[in-house]
Image (cartoon, rainbow, N blue to C red):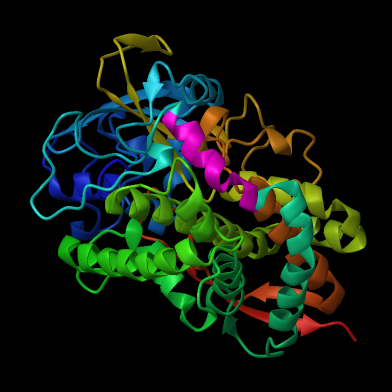
Amino acid sequence: MSEQPVSAEESTNQASTQRRMPSAEGAEQKGPLPAAADLAIEDIMMVNPRLFSEHRWAEYFARLRAEDPVHFNETDLAGRFWSLTRYADIKKVDTDWKNFSSAHGITLGFPVGAELPEGMLNITTFIAMDPPVHDAQRKTVAGSVAPTNLGKMESLIRERACKVLDDLPEGETFDWVETVSIELTTMMLATLFDFPFEDRRKLTRWSDITFAIPQPGGLIETNEQRREELLECLQYFQRLKDERTKNPGHDLVSMMAHGADTKDLSPMEYLGNLLLLIVGGNDTTRNTMSGSVYALNKFPDQFAKLAANPALIPQMVAEVIRWQTPLSYMRRTANHDTEVGGKQIKKGDQMLMWYISGNRDEAVFADADRLDIERPNARQHLSFGFGVHRCMGNRLAELQLRILWEELLQRFEKIEVQAEPDRTFSSFVNGYTRLPVKVTRKA
């Protein structure tokens, strides 16, 4: 996020591509998506958001892994970019920050050196930096999710999960995303930031619009709307920072206000780090909470196995995180001319590491499309990344999911999905906007 979030989808929605999947404009496309097998390989473009909102991505990635695992595309706005779809290539790039930089952004954006469109915010954040600056800024806030702090938070997380689950209606359909996933993750974010609890849904809104694609009737309709709302986020958190500068606590805002490497950040650097922490603490956990319910409905034998043996919950959590992959990809940028998977990469090329595809790589995960809560190598998933940018809050996410399922299994005989979910219109966030369910409580 070295610039205002410009998603890959915006590039494909706005650009006429030199090589593209037919109608890669996403929201503007009419009619059904073509089958992956019906396209010339060079016409496959994985950043089409409809592939994700319509849950069609798996067949396309399977074809790329088999035929063209380091796959080239080019658009007028984004320039040259490569899709890495096999586990080994993704891990190679993710762990090599010297040759593949994060400093130009974590999502598909503009070519290196290109001017930003007028009116866009020039946001920076430590995930879009390389060592040593990245390491120093990350260290400032990493203590919030250190093991000792997680131990202190466990009882609070459990208390809130119990309250939310006890209040669920029985025998009537409700939206799991809104009622459970958003509520639990937003309360956790409010605690981490010591954010006014009555305003906590603002955090959800700011997280959602950070990578949203402007479209009529969408979360945002224009980039200008996003700009205005993110500036409101900055103003709100600037007030909190001013307060915590004088009266510090143990929250993320206080840590940034007093950290030697973060206290003097520019407004756009401060906003960038805030959005990173908000999105990281919201999207990944929230969508895996929803994804776990969906997955265990899709594979009822695995739900039965879990209900019979709750000791499998930690292993199930790791497997669900692999199966769901809440953030589909991360971007790096080549620092030099190099080679990946036999393809010649040019300096400045954008490299999209498709975690969601690497987590389906049959060379690593047998029967990879299937949820297997006893999968022996589930923890080798790519969802948290590797190397210096490995997800800082991975243990907190696992803790929240573990507690949720410990309490779910104590209360409910069944959690039944009533219809296919509505999914996020994005190739970056692999998420759910609605999941209708009914619950049956234990006698």
Along the horizontal axis of the image, is 406 left or right of 247? right
Q: Where is residue 200 in the image (x, y as percent from the top left)?
A: 49, 76
Q: Is residue 71 visible?
A: yes
Q: Is residue 11 magenta?
A: no
Closer to the camera in the image, 81 or 230: 230
The residue that appears at 54% across and 72% down in the rendered structure is 182
Closer to the camera in the image, 156 or 41: 156
Q: Does the magenta stretch include residue 141?
A: yes
Give the magenta-colored segment's residue range: 133-144
Which quadrant holds residue 290? bottom right
Q: Can residue 320 be seen in this view?
A: no
Residue reaching furthest to the front: 246
Q: Position of residue 332 (x, y in %)?
A: 37, 29
Along the horizontal axis of the image, is 163 left or right of 333? right
The residue that appears at 83% across and 78% down in the rendered structure is 411
Q: Main secondary structure of the magenta part?
A: helix
The residue that appears at 38% across and 37% down in the rendered structure is 128
Q: How many marks?
A: 0
Which quadrant holds residue 414? bottom right
Vertical placement of 171 versus 376: above or below? below
Vertical placement of 439 versus 296: above or below? below
Vertical placement of 167 versus 320: above or below? below
Along the horizontal axis of the image, is 349 left or right of 367? left
Q: Where is residue 177 in the image (x, y as percent from the top left)?
A: 55, 72
Q: Position of residue 331 (x, y in %)?
A: 38, 34
Vertical placement of 100 versus 40: above or below? above
The residue that appears at 36% across and 47% down in the rendered structure is 264
